[in-house]
């Protein structure tokens, strides 16, 4: 892999060729190997591919063929176990290249063969050979196999760690592609390489950014003293620390000036343990406020904040301390909740800043202003988005910001949610309704297609799939587009309410149901959910007793009543697209072992504490670090407590999940919805912070399996069976195993998932339907792939080639009989 480094130095190449010449004369094979690595490192730099003179290439071939003679060209170990790619060895290596790779010498097929035979010598040669390439998945398989055999020695670790991209993956920093024990072997080598790269103030950020996350107090102290690029200093200052190292850092900072202490605090924000420095800064008690400030920060999206939680956290400190903390960690939304930064926030609104708009919703009303007047102003901001932002993505970003601002405004005004605020706002200042547009034989209006707001065209009472050209060109369409934008906002806010109703199981009073149903969004979306009435009956909205409160059915509650499969089958029969996840939402029930009041399914799961903490905080969990890491959340009358296995803090480093308990009740006495949602939160946190290559979301796999089961019940297929979280597809060309949690697809028992084109399955299979309007495309794509693989006799050559079933070798293909070049 090419490094983003400085251009090759030809003088350095000349020196290295001379060194190889001297080592060959002395018979020094060790120096020859090291020199070959240095030469290849230089040639992999920018502009170095053809930097060697022809005479030098010929001399190097002679030197290395003599020092490392090739004795058996048919033995891949003999061919690959050489430090320099001489012409003779390159020609021999090409015979072992994968047939389905048209460019370069790719040797992943040899990796599979070596793993099958347990040939560890060949695996070692494949890991470091300069005669071909293996992908990162293959390198991970090699490293895991050698680690399991006790043969992943320091020399090999050091060689692989020289590649910054590969070492980052093998150390488990970018994504978990190796076992935890293998990652532990690579991390010290990554640390040492990073230490060397940052030993001088001119450390290159472009080289550093590709490396693994630093570990250890020495990096933090170096970051505080670093005088070069501020990005390098920040990267070092956010190093992973153990609990003992964090305590040592605090003691070190006690004697430092306030400026140095605040610099360390700022650096540790990225690490997630800055809250431990708050007492040092005289801000003891502000820990929860800091967590809320950080949870509400997201560089690429606007975030809904909980005003009551912000006010409660701010009440634990003095107002002056809250202001000081917000200067250290700016957050306009939190500042707005406290009534601060009014003028700067209004300036940001005037500049159409998405974050400024969300903060505007959180500001208490000014003098002479009412909440409903601000509702009108925000609605106008949403309407004008089409004029201000021609680009669809920018319009969408702005619309989401307005929706979040209205959610914040509902909290300020004491409304149940943004949907209730909408109902009150419509009574105060009704949205102008444009008349239907009549264009020739067509009638065009803003309404709903299933669960989505859309401009709908009809002809002779029949709804058309697309707008006719005459309607698209009619000037009257502009008013409908404005109405559509407002309707989409109303829909998004109502969906937020519906999602909370499903998640919490709280009843919806009859009067509020009537108010919501009187709105266009409520009339369109409420009938698409399954409800439970006061008499305990489940059904569609119009089939139930609506004189009393209704509950939006949760799949865990339906499963407990033995009705989930029935309603999922109804959804498949109707091809129902719901506004929020309900019938195919991930759900969980306690196992027999968990009926004592402790959910132990996550016991032993080790996660990245920072990533898991951010996910839990965004879901309303309160995080505590003393005396051990734990998280708490209220679910109505019940409290869920997650205990960590290791002492330390949530902000950084690894945290082990120990158990989830519901104090005062056994898990079998906790309402199914509460148990399910608590476990779902933890699964999402574990997924966000997963450290092990084997981790996958259990609930996602099951919900996908339920959707596939419901679809197959309508059409049937004897080629598709289920084996736990894996779907086995017995196609006419091969047997495919599709993991419903990780999306991995393997062919004919292969170890390596096939890398299929994103477009494969992007168009939903004719048997599938979209179960949820605002998401589910990944699920639909995966299940479309399953159904397409069951019909693999109809696949084209590009798909067969990606699956490894057609070879572009110019000969008739065994799978399809065609010739692929």
Image: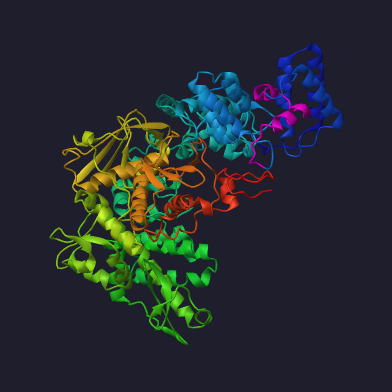
Question: With 541 as the anchor, is 694 left or right in this view?
Answer: right
Residue 642, given in percent of the width and then of the height, sits at 28, 37
User: Does residue 225 show up?
Assistant: no
Front residue (pair 36, 207): 36
Residue 410, given in percent of the width and then of the height, sits at 31, 62
Front residue (pair 569, 255): 569
Question: With 655 as the anchor, is 96 left or right in this view?
Answer: right
Relative to 585, is 436 above or below? below
Q: Residue furthest left?
A: 535
Front residue (pair 486, 250): 486
Residue 703, given in percent of the width and then of the height, sits at 34, 49
Question: With 539 as the anchor, is 718 left or right in this view?
Answer: right
Q: How is the image coloured?
A: rainbow
Q: Residue at x 74, y 33 (%)?
A: 43
Front residue (pair 663, 557): 557
Q: Name which quarter of the figure residue 458 lies in.
A: bottom left
Relative to 281, is 415 above or below? below
Residue 243, given in percent of the width and then of the height, sits at 40, 27
Quadrant placement of the N terminus = top right
User: Does residue 121 show up?
Assistant: yes
Q: Residue furthest top?
A: 26
Question: With 200 as the anchor, is 628 left or right in this view?
Answer: left
Verify whether residue 186 appears in magenta.
no
Which contiguous range is marked in magenta?
75-101
Relative to 37, is 266 above or below? below
Q: Name which quarter of the figure residue 631 lies in.
A: top left
Number of numbered discs visible in the structure rendering: 0
Q: Residue at x 60, y 51 (%)?
A: 797
């Amino acid at each position: 892999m090419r490094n983003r480094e400085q251009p090759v130095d030809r003088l350095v190449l000349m020196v290295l060729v001379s060194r190889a010449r001297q080592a060959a004369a002395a018979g020094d094979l060790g120096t020859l190997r090291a020199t070959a690595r240095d030469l290849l490192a230089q040639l992999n730099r920018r502009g170095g591919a053809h930097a060697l003179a022809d005479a030098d290439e010929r001399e190097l071939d002679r030197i290395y063929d003599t020092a490392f003679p090739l004795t058996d060209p048919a033995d891949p170990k003999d061919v690959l176990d050489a430090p320099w790619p001489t012409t003779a060895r390159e020609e021999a290596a090409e015979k072992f290249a994968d047939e389905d790779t048209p460019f370069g010498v790719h040797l992943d097929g040899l990796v599979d063969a070596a793993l099958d035979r347990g040939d560890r010598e060949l695996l070692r040669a494949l890991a470091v050979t300069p005669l071909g390439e293996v992908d990162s998945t293959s390198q991970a398989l090699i490293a895991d196999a050698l680690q399991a055999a006790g043969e992943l020695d320091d020399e090999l670790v050091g060689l692989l760690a020289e590649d910054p991209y590969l070492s980052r993956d093998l150390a488990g920093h970018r994504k978990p592609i190796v076992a935890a024990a293998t990652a532990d072997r690579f991390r010290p080598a990554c640390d040492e390489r990073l230490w060397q790269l940052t030993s001088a103030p001119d450390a290159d950020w472009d080289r550093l950014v590709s490396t693994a996350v630093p570990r250890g107090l020495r990096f933090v102290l170096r970051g505080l003293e670093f005088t070069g690029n501020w990005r390098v200093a920040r990267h070092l200052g956010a190093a992973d620390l153990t609990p003992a190292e964090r305590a040592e850092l605090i003691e070190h900072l006690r004697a430092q000036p306030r400026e140095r202490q605040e610099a360390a605090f700022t650096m540790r924000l990225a690490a997630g343990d800055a809250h431990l420095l708050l007492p040092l800064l005289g801000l003891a008690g502000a820990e929860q406020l800091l967590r809320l400030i950080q949870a509400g920060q997201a560089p690429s999206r606007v975030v809904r904040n909980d005003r009551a939680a912000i006010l409660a956290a701010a009440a634990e400190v003095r107002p002056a301390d809250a202001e000081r903390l917000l200067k250290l960690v700016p957050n306009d939304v939190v500042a707005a909740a406290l009534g601060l930064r009014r003028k700067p926030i209004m300036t940001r609104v005037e500049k159409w800043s998405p974050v400024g708009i969300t903060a505007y919703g959180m500001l208490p009303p000014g003098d002479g202003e009412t909440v409903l007047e601000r509702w009108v102003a925000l609605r106008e901001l949403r309407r004008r988005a089409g004029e201000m932002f021609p680009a669809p993505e920018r319009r969408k970003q702005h619309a989401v910001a307005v929706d979040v601002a209205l959610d914040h405004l509902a909290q300020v005004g004491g409304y149940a949610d943004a949907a209730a605020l909408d109902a009150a706002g419509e009574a105060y200042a009704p949205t102008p309704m444009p008349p239907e547009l009549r264009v020739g034989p067509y009638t065009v209006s803003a309404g709903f297609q299933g669960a989505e707001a859309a401009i709908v065209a009809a002809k002779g009472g029949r709804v058309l799939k697309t707008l006719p050209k005459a309607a698209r060109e009619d000037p009257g369409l502009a008013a409908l587009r404005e109405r559509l934008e407002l309707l989409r906002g109303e829909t998004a806010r109502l969906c937020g309410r519906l999602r909370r109703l499903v998640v919490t199981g709280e009843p919806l009073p009859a009067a509020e149901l009537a108010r919501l149903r009187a709105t266009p969004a409520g009339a369109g979306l409420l009938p698409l959910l399954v409800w439970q009435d006061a008499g305990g009956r489940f059904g569609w909205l119009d089939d139930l007793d609506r004189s009393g409160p209704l509950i939006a059915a949760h799949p865990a509650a339906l499963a407990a009543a033995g009705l989930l499969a029935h309603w999922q089958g109804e959804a498949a029969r109707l091809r129902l697209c719901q506004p929020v996840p309900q019938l195919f939402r991930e759900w969980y029930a306690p196992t027999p072992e968990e009926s004592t009041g402790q959910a132990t399914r996550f016991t032993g799961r080790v996660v990245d504490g920072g990533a898991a903490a951010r996910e839990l905080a965004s879901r309303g969990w309160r995080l505590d670090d003393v005396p051990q890491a734990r998280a708490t959340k209220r679910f109505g009358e019940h409290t869920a407590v997650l205990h960590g296995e290791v002492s330390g803090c949530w902000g950084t480093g690894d945290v082990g999940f120990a158990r989830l308990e519901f104090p005062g009740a056994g898990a079998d006495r906790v309402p199914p919805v509460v148990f399910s949602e608590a476990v779902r939160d933890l699964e999402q946190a574990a997924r966000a912070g997963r450290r092990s290559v084997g981790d996958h979301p259990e609930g996602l796999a099951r919900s996908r399996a339920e959707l596939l089961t419901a679809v197959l019940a309508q059409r049937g297929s004897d080629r598709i069976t289920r084996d736990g979280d894996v779907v086995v597809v017995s196609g006419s060309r091969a047997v495919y195993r599709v993991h419903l949690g990780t999306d991995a697809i393997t062919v004919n028992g292969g170890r390596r998932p096939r890398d299929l084109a994103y477009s494969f399955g992007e168009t939903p299979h004719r048997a599938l339907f979209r179960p949820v309007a605002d998401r589910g495309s990944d699920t639909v794509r995966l299940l479309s792939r399953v159904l397409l693989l069951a019909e693999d006799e109809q696949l084209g050559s590009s798909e067969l080639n990606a699956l490894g079933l057609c070879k572009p070798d110019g000969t008739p293909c065994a799978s399809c009989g065609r010739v692929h070049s």
